[in-house]
Amino acid sequence: MRFDVAVVGLGGMGSAALAHCAARGASAIGIEQFGVGHDLGSSHGKSRMIRKAYFENPAYVPLILRAYDLWHELEREAGEELLRITGVLAVGPENSKIVERTRHTATLHGLPLEQLSRREIEARYPTLKLLPSEAGVFEPDGGVLDPERAIAAHARVAEQRGAELRCDVAMQSWQPTSHGFEIHLSDGSRVDTRALVLTIGPWFKATLESLGVPIDVQRNVQVWFQPSTDVYDVGRFTSFLLDRAGLPAPLYGFPDFGAGLKAAFHGAGELTDADRVNRSIDVSRDVAPLSAALEQWMPGATAGLRGAKACMYTLTTDHDFVIDRHPQHANLVMCGGFSGHGFKFAPVVGEIAADLALDRGTRHDIRFLSLARFAT
Ligand SMILES: Cc1cc2nc3c(=O)[nH]c(=O)nc-3n(C[C@H](O)[C@H](O)[C@H](O)COP(=O)(O)OP(=O)(O)OC[C@H]3O[C@@H](n4cnc5c(N)ncnc54)[C@H](O)[C@@H]3O)c2cc1C
């Protein structure tokens, strides 16, 4: 059978791409080397932050607004809650990039954002310990996505729309044919397809580098703690970002949804490779610095250790994504380099991937995510 589109890699982005391709009525197949919702790539760990006032680059705002709508559509179709609004509190010194640029983006796009002094933050969250120079902003629309359930929901919706899923089989190679591509799989079978979407996360490094896009794969550890108090429970506490001098990287975390309070440094791990990433946890190296930073910021947060998992960032040099067609093959769409902040965009990335694979163009402005920016 020849498919209209094959999506290779069914993590956060690929599961969404498959659902959106199938929604257009295309015959679609999804190929995943592991199972749906596995914990070996970049999309595991039960929580991913979503926010609108994007400090990284205001150009993402139209995409994130569309993503919110699409997450809610997916929730309706899947019949489950995937996004919980908790608010996001960002704290740092007055000249903090995170606080300053969050404010800038909110003003530019007219997004709701509260400016909070140190005293106002301490009044709202009395256990928090701020430094005298720190202040912050609170984004009421910020929240938390459940990545494993979101991937399962996209995959399920894709199947309900007629897509075929092939798990536990890897793409070994692809080659162009007169009508599209022939994909060679690790079980010896082949798939014929008119268009190909590659959403292979940290396994993209070699392919992107062959096109002149330098990629670093970075190991990042996420840790779950048992607080000694209920003040950090969901409903009482917020998701947060802390930009504080002396930390290895900004600290972020989520309220306790019942399985512990999750926190991590945003981009502080060693560089690695998807096939040889160290998945074992060394408490003194992976947990202790995080636990010390958390205790200084939110005392009582780390009374017990509940678990920790390594995950991978796929970093481009400017930390912006790559969403584009292959320069030599217009019907090969590449979505990668999500640089540790991509999950919240998954459904809009899926929509764009379907646009590019099936319609050859998209109404979304993704020029800032093009391959061409690396040409110089
Ligand atoms: C610790 C951590 C915290 C994060 N926090 C946030 C956050 O708060 N908010 C946010 O928006 N983002 C966050 N991110 C980033 C976000 O999770 C990623 O950008 C996103 O999950 C990337 O999705 P992906 O589909 O590109 O990669 P993956 O989910 O890794 O998917 C790639 C898939 O391709 C498959 N694959 C690879 N090669 C092949 C092959 N040859 N054949 C078949 N299948 C193949 C893999 O098995 C995998 O399933 C975080 C990331 C990490 C690691």
Image (cartoon, rainbow, N blue to C red):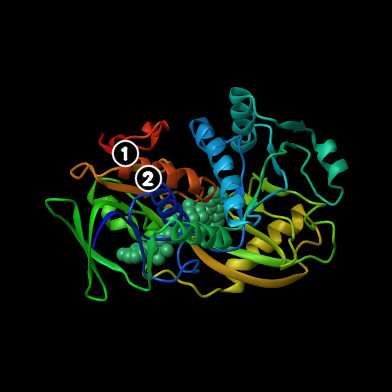
The quarter in which the C terminus is drawn is top left
- Report helix, strand or loop for mark 2: helix
For the residues bearing labels 2 and 1, Cβ distance under 8 angstroms: yes
From the viewer's perspective, is 253 left or right of 356?
right
Please name the residue shown 51% across and 48% down the image.
341
Q: Is the CB–ligand 1 distance for label 2 below 8 Å?
A: no
Q: Pick whichever, 195 or 113, lies toward us.
A: 195
From the viewer's perspective, is 248 left or right of 272?
right
Numbered badge on residue 354? 2
- Position of residue 344 measured from the top left corner of the image (x, y, whole percent): 55, 47
Please name the residue shown 74% across and 36% down the image.
133
Of mark 2 and mark 1, the one earlier in the sequence is 2
- Position of residue 123 measured from the top left corner of the image (x, y, whole percent): 88, 41
Rendering quarter of residue 34: bottom left
Q: Pick whichever, 250 or 289, lies toward us.
A: 250
Label 2 and label 1: CA atoms lie apart by 7 Å
For label 1, the residue is: 359
- Position of residue 128 measured from the top left corner of the image (x, y, whole percent): 81, 49
